[in-house]
Amino acid sequence: AQTVTQSQPEMSVQEAETVTLSCTYDTSENNYYLFWYKQPPSRQMILVIRQEAYKQQNATENRFSVNFQKAAKSFSLKISDSQLGDTAMYFCAFMTSGNTPLVFGKGTRLSVIA
Amino acid sequence: EPEVTQTPSHQVTQMGQEVILRCVPISNHLYFYWYRQILGQKVEFLVSFYNNEISEKSEIFDDQFSVERPDGSNFTLKIRSTKLEDSAMYFCASSPGLAGPHEQYFGPGTRLTVT
């Protein structure tokens, strides 16, 4: 079975600084998809960024980027120029193939401090 | 931009009562999902639905749960006899299916409180 581990329950960062959230996963699959979801206090799950395992290039979305290390089964999220609105729970999630269920990590609570 | 909607936003019910949580997935999506999140815990998969039938379900999705797509737009989760431990946030999600990035779009959730 696939597992996703987020080893940082809580993190904080100063506004405008950069922070990196860690995620590791375990799978025997070769092709899969990885995601970071943001859950603000409103509790809605919002997709931040995704990465296809077959792509070597790391995904980027504006201030958000990932460091995908397939051999190490690591998928970290870097948030640059942190903003107060980035304060949220961040969940790393894994999907074996299209349309299969997402497997989530336990989340990292990120606080951006003014 | 199209979005997944869920009603109600908050449902309070007594133990043993039946509840129906409603979702309207994005209109051209083919796959539908229910997840739940007990307060303070991670999001857990319950069931996925495709082509008018369950495609996959987790151990959590026992005989007390059922899903239905009664018409072309709604996707419902029914809990027949609620228990205290069913108190959680329930998220509906949908994805386009077929080829593509396969990302799942989540609704805002329904907070279910069983007393």
Image (cartoon, coloured by chain):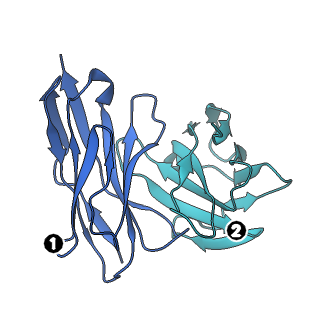
Chain colours: A blue, B cyan
> What is the x, y in percent for residue B15?
62, 43
Of A61 and A87, nearer the camera is A61
The quarter holding residue B67 reads bottom right
Q: Chain of mark 2?
A: B
Q: Quadrant of residue B17?
A: top right
Task: Please state which amino acid type lies under the numbered disc 1.
Answer: Ala
Answer left or right for B45 relative to B16: left
Q: Which residue is mark 1?
A: A72
- Amino acid type indicated by mark 2: Tyr
The C terminus of chain B: image quadrant: top right
Kindly indicate whether the residues beneath marks 2 and 1 are on one polypeptide chain: no
Residue at 35% x, 48% y: name it: B41
How far across and down, in percent of the image, does residue B102 sit?
Answer: 53, 62
Image location of residue A54, percent across then percent down: 35, 74
How crowded is the residue under tag 1: few (<14 C-alpha within 10 Å), some, or many (20+)? few
In whole angstroms, how far apart are the C-alphas of marks 2 and 1?
34 Å
Residue ranking furthest to the right: B71
Q: Give x and y (percent) for residue B30.
A: 69, 62
**On the image, numbered disc 2 is attached to which residue?**
B50
Quadrant including the N terminus of chain B: top right
Q: Nearer the viewer, residue B41 or A114?
A: A114
Q: Residue at x 50, y 60 (%)?
A: B45
| Foreground tag (2 vs 1) | 1
Examine the rendered structure and indicate whether residue A30 appears above or below residue B89: below
Q: Is residue B109 above or below residue A28?
A: above
Image side of residue B4 versus residue A38, left or right: right
Residue A6 relative to residue B19: left or right: left
Does dot 2 land on a helix, a strand or a loop? strand
From where the camera sits, is residue B83 visible?
A: no
